Amino acid sequence: MNMPNELLYAKTHEWVKKVNPKEVIMGITDFAQQQLKDIVFVELPAVGKELKAGAPCAVVESVKAAYDIYAPVSGKVVKVNQKIQEKPQLVNEDPYGEGWFLQMEISNPNELGSLLNPDQYRVAVESEH
Amino acid sequence: MEKTPLYDTHLKFNAKMVSFHDYVMPLQYDTIINEHHAVRKHAGLFDISHMGRFEISGDRAFPFIQHLITNDAARLADKQVLYTPICNEQGGIIDDVLVYKWHAKRFMLVVNCGNTGKDLLWLQKQATDYQPLEIRDLTGSLSLVAIQGPESVRMSEAVFNTKFDALKRFFFDEYPWDGAQIIVSRTGYTGEDGFEIFVDAKQVVKLWDILLEMNAPDGLRPVGLGARDTLRLEAGLLLYGNDMDETITPIETTIDWTVKFDKDHFIGKESLLRERAKGIERRMIGFEMIDRGIPRHGYPVLKDNLTTGKVTSGSFSPSTNKNIGLCLVQSQYAGIAEEMKVRIRDGDYKARTVKTPFYKRELK
């Protein structure tokens, strides 16, 4: 299972990458895409939407069912990845790269402190099995 | 939880197991999409031993079957198979089943897993006027696997060392295998050519292993319930519990052709005749999404912002690369090429009604 060192993780299987002091990019983890298997649809929020940490912010659908994706931190959506709406399998193929979900301006940088580092996330995933 | 005799085999193939009614069954071994395409291109092997199987025998077995089903068993030759609903007095669908006719005094029913217990009670209740009649539950003793796909016939011929040219669609016969008799039926739930094979529960693991051992190099692979669902939906085949239940009558659905009103009598006939005379208020129709979004069971269907019905089945369709579904809507909206909307979460998305099946195999 791939868990890049430079990222932060939420227990609900999202990853966060700081791109500058005010903004982060997020997506779903390699573990999450493996569990979902073939992703055939992604629904993303509108640019400008205010997200609240822990609340649903996107939906991914496998062949079988729809699953909520949660905002790892609070903030405003500044950009979404149109490419995964046209080609949802990018989330399976490259969850930390081309399969990113959205970029957001964070409203409370302290929330980053409650996210997990790769080792903590690994423990969380293993305890789920 | 019940397990089929192939449970350990599924684990060996790394299946993701799920509970399905009373059984633990393989949802998928690989991705659902890969398994789906394998069945359309080559062939897939399914464990469907969870489905219920009853043998019905007795002097009055034929009139009993005719009483029970809406379709007409008088049209059946010996060793022919008939698809039919079983309705209650109100015309609601208790189950949809396959009727296997050995001869006028011996039949077999294959029923849905989730309905096995309910069906057995219904059969026993209806049997009182048709005694002596024996109803035997074969579900535990006789296993059932399906091999489906364009190459399934050739693959089966290699294993059983027999030609199946004489076995036509919706017929079955007995064949010798491994010191016993197996029943091979040219039926399925995928829209492809193929067989459903009844084999003694003690021999099913051996049969499964040999089928795969001989044919895996040519593309045969195990397929789970996930792809079984996308395959059947593309083929326009209904699923009990989704597209049918006791509040839905067959004449409202796409299997209205299975109700034979020219039969003297069957359970539910009077109610269905009344419904037909009054005008059928809602009908089932296929649709495909125009906007992006995947329809799912239970989502509302709308026309001009008013709810006109609901989605009964919906999915991404790997063979057409579209999002498709079946819906039950007010009859005036159930024509072909009607624009409608499907409410997905908090948005309404455009769709258009289409003829089913969504996918049709090329006939050789």
Image: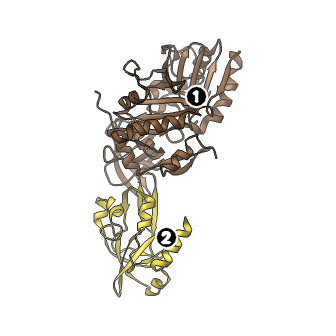
Chain colours: A yellow, B brown
Label 1, label 2: how many angstroms apart (C-alpha)?
46 Å
Can you give x and y, in whole percent of width and height, for residue B169 in the image? 40, 23
Q: Which of the pair B112/B144 is nearer the observer?
A: B144
Instruction: Identify the residue at horizontal 42%, vertical 53% (top origin).
Output: B343
Chain designation of label 1:
B
Q: Chain of mark 2?
A: A
* Relative side of B348 to B95, left or right: left
- Few, some or many C-alpha atoms within 10 Å of disc 2 (few <14, some 14-19, many ≥20)? some
Residue at 68% of width from left, 20% of height from top? B134
The answer to whether residue B226 shows anywhere in this view is yes
Instruction: Say above or below: B51 vs B170.
Output: below
**Of the pair A50 and B28, the residue shown nearer to us:** B28
Coordinates of residue B65 in the picture (x, y in percent) = 59, 19
Quadrant in which the C terminus of chain A appears: bottom right
* Secondary structure found at label 1: strand
Indicate the position of residue B257 as horizontal and vertical percent values: 44, 25
Q: Is residue B95 above or below residue B288?
A: above
Q: Is B235 placed left or right of B84 in the picture?
A: left
Identify the residue shown where x is 49% and y is 70%: A12
Q: Report the residue marked by disc 1.
A: B87
Is residue A88 visible to us here? Answer: no
Vertical placement of A110 versus B337: above or below? below
Furthest residue toward front: B179
Q: Amino acid at mark 2?
A: Thr
The reply, left or right, for residue A98 in relation to residue B9 is: left
Q: Quadrant of the N terminus of chain A?
A: bottom left
Horizontal side of A80 relative to A30 (left or right) equals left
Assign a secondary structure to mark 2.
loop
**Picture coordinates of residue B202, whole percent (x, y):** 59, 34
Q: Which residue is mark 2?
A: A12
Circle 1: residue type: Cys
